[in-house]
Amino acid sequence: MGRTDILYKKHKTRQDLRTLLSWTDPDLCQALYAAAYDVKVRNVGAVVYYRGLIEFSNECIKNCRYCGIRRGNTSVKRFRTEREDILSMADWTYRNQYGSITLQSGERQDEEFITYVEGLIRDIKTLSHGELGITLCVGEQEDRAYERWFAAGAHRYLLRIETGNPALYATLHPQDGHHVWQVRKQCLQTLRRIGYQVGTGDMIGLPGQTLDDLVDDILFYQQMDIDMIGMGPYVVHHNTPVGKEVLQAGLDSEAEKRRRLRLGLNMIAVTRLVLPDVNIAATTALQALHPLGRELGLKAGANVLMPIVTLPKFRPQYVLYDNKPCVDENPQQCRHCLQARVASVGDVVGFGKWGDAPHFFHTRRESAQGSKSSENGI
């Protein structure tokens, strides 16, 4: 049996996934990416959907040890974008037919913040006549906050698990009782119960992370019935505890960055093979490690891009990791740049469409059929 035959096995074992993730030979990797791209085309189409990214505040109560806007980073100038500016950015996104936006910020859990986001969602729905899809990425919250935002009109929520390994998760966060892996998992379950399309993801190439951890992450997405996945290679931020440890240990060489990039692309491709009908983002972290990183992500099976719409004056203050792309561009420049990147891989942009994951509707249909069968005594 040839080494690439594993790509076409209908039911892949855990060892199969580990083997695919471990591939480093360029020819094997290209075969993996080609197979994943074919699965993408057959299940979600050769269409890339935009999520206009509005990073509206970098204030954060969390102190994650890898993140550039962690509470303990006193060198960051904190900001809150004025409501009128956020609505102006949302209107620009609507007029440019992005189809959807993502509202992202540092994490807050106070009533003022919850009410503010709720009002933003309603206002954005009003200005777009209900036509803009809204994804939220604002961290862990109590059930009631998620419910209020869903009722206001948000329909997708992205909350990265960061890693499916609780022990590894603990190395990324202070042990203060406010950074608990089980709480994060429970939030994902709550979001599913409320009715959101649920997104999560991991960081790839973390210090201490193994191939088995990455296999477990893919199985976690499957077991949690995830609809959309935003994952990317770990990129150092020099002014964080984890970043400093990596730099001091000499673990951020060009060879190491190439390893993380390859592993990130392998993760996109293997995840696409396992979960053919989910949405997978080609993240900016890929481009932080390679000028064509996002194109490579699309060719490996990703189908979502998140062009930055954040006001240019705030972009330098919303830097989660070093060498973040597009910090010095304006929204119009990002629009033209990304459209060319999409065309270069043979895909088209799904302008004016929400681009929801088919998986979400497949799951709902199966659930409804199961309930009907149960009612009928089948």
Image (cartoon, helix red, strand yellow):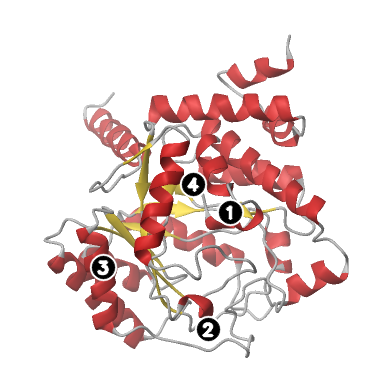
Residue 21 placed where, x, y %? Answer: 70, 36
Q: Is residue 215 above or below residue 247?
A: above
Q: Residue at x 18, y 73 (%)?
A: 123
Dot in front, 4 or 3: 3
Kind of residue indicated by mark 1: Gln
- Mark 4 is surrounded, within 10 Å at the Cα level, by few (under 14), some (14 to 19) or many (20 or more) other residues, namely some
Question: Could you tell which of marks 4 and 3 lies nearer the N-terminus?
Answer: 3
Q: Residue at x 63, y 66 (%)?
A: 323
- Mark 2 is surrounded, within 10 Å at the Cα level, by few (under 14), some (14 to 19) or many (20 or more) other residues, namely some
Is 43 left, or right, of 317 in this rendering?
left
Secondary structure type for disc 2: loop
Quadrant location of the N terminus?
top right
User: Which residue, given by chain and number where applicable, does mark 1 sit on?
Assistant: 287
Is 183 left, or right, of 114 in this rendering?
right
Residue 366 placed where, x, y %? Answer: 32, 32
Give residue 224's mark: 4
Secondary structure type for disc 3: helix
The answer to whether residue 179 of the structure is visible from this angle is: yes
User: Which residue, given by chain and number where applicable, does mark 2 sit on?
Assistant: 61
* Cα distance between the residues tagged 4 and 3: 31 Å
Give residue 90's mark: 3
Secondary structure type for disc 1: helix
